[in-house]
Amino acid sequence: MTSVREATTSVFDRYAENPVERREAVLGVLLILPAVVLIGAVILYPIAYNVYLSFTEVPLNPNRAPQWVGLGNYVELLTAARFWSAFTTTVAFTVGSTVLSTVVGLAVALLFDREFRGRRLARGLVLLPHVTPIIAVAFVWQFMLSPLWGSIPNLLAEWGLYGTRVGLLEQSATALPVVVVFSAWRNFPFAFLLFVARLQAIPESMYEAARIDGAGALAQFKDITLPELKGTIAIVVLLRFIWEFNTFAEVWLLTRQVLTLPIFAYQTAFANFEQGLGAAISLLLFLVQALFVLGFVTLFGEDKV
């Protein structure tokens, strides 16, 4: 069996002996070089610089260099109650919105997995929450949730579920559930699209055979639909967890009463001007997501995700 060194040497010898292949190899390197430089400039360098900043204390004076503090920023964060409160809120928001958007997306996809008049138009309408600009839908939800003229508080008051003058978005006890529902409403069309595409790929013959054997709708869903959707469910949960864990705009535009880690990092770095701490928060955010992805792939297997 040819060793790696021998194989590499033979490749270089072939390029050295054949001018045409050598020119093609050089051309290939030149073609991908701009992409490599661009990725390094806009992704790799900021990540490396952020890692460096997380170990420093950045002075307000731009003429002064950051001071090395080692693990001081991480020790300060991991011993701060506000950090753990933001972490707990982030986990609760991420899990709640991910589960809710996945379940709603699956339910709506099952409803659309049949022929009916106006199905194409209805599919387009389902996508509206996801494609409408976030700034517009956030203001509409703020208007609907306003204790003065909002329709939702008035409806809840008629049902006896709401009897305070404080708005639902103005107290942390109710703001978090509202933000979870808002995020799920906005993002369930993403899950809906993936589920619809997978449902249409399931052979109809499988359902026909199940009906011949006397299986009802619930049994068909449990024994055919759900097993066929396991891979898609895993992908939806993984992607939604990553995106929800990083969510900033949906929470920030809707209310200031919910403190998640992205908002905590923003406030620390750009409101309190503690950029070293902000960089440390963002790096911890990245590490948590990396551990989750690693554990998720290990648990479900690479063939599922």
Image (cartoon, helix red, strand yellow):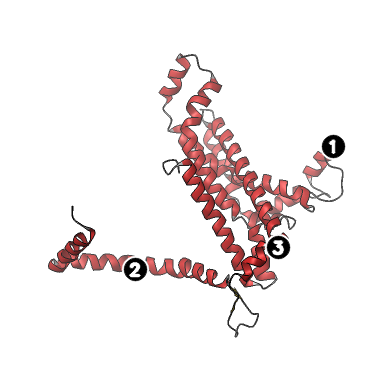
Q: Amino acid at mark 1?
A: Glu
- CA distance for labels 2 and 1: 64 Å
Of the image marks 3 and 2, the number of the one nearer the N terminus? 2
Q: Residue at x 58, y 61 (%)?
A: 284
Closer-to-camera residue (301/17): 301
Q: Is residue 39 above or below residue 297?
A: below
Position in image of residue 151 (x %, y %): 78, 43
As drawn, the residue found furthest toward the bottom would be 63
- CA distance for labels 3 and 2: 44 Å
Closer-to-camera residue (276/214): 276
Q: Residues within 10 Å of mark 1 (few under 14, many from 20)?
A: few
161 left or right, relative to 21: right
Q: Residue at x 64, y 48 (%)?
A: 183
Of the image marks 2 and 1, the number of the one nearer the N terminus? 2
Of the image marks 1 and 3, the number of the one nearer the N terminus? 3
SS type, badge 2: helix
The residue identified by callout 1 is: 158
Q: Amino acid at mark 2?
A: Leu
Query: Of the numbered discs in the image, which one, if any, rests on residue 33?
Result: 2
Q: Is residue 224 visible?
A: yes
Position in image of residue 287 (x %, y %): 54, 58
Position in image of residue 99 (x %, y %): 61, 41
Quadrant in which the C terminus appears = top left
Position in image of residue 50 (x %, y %): 54, 69
Q: Residues within 10 Å of mark 2 (few under 14, many from 20)?
A: few
Q: Residue at x 79, y 52 (%)?
A: 171
Q: Is residue 118 visible?
A: no
The residue identified by callout 3 is: 80
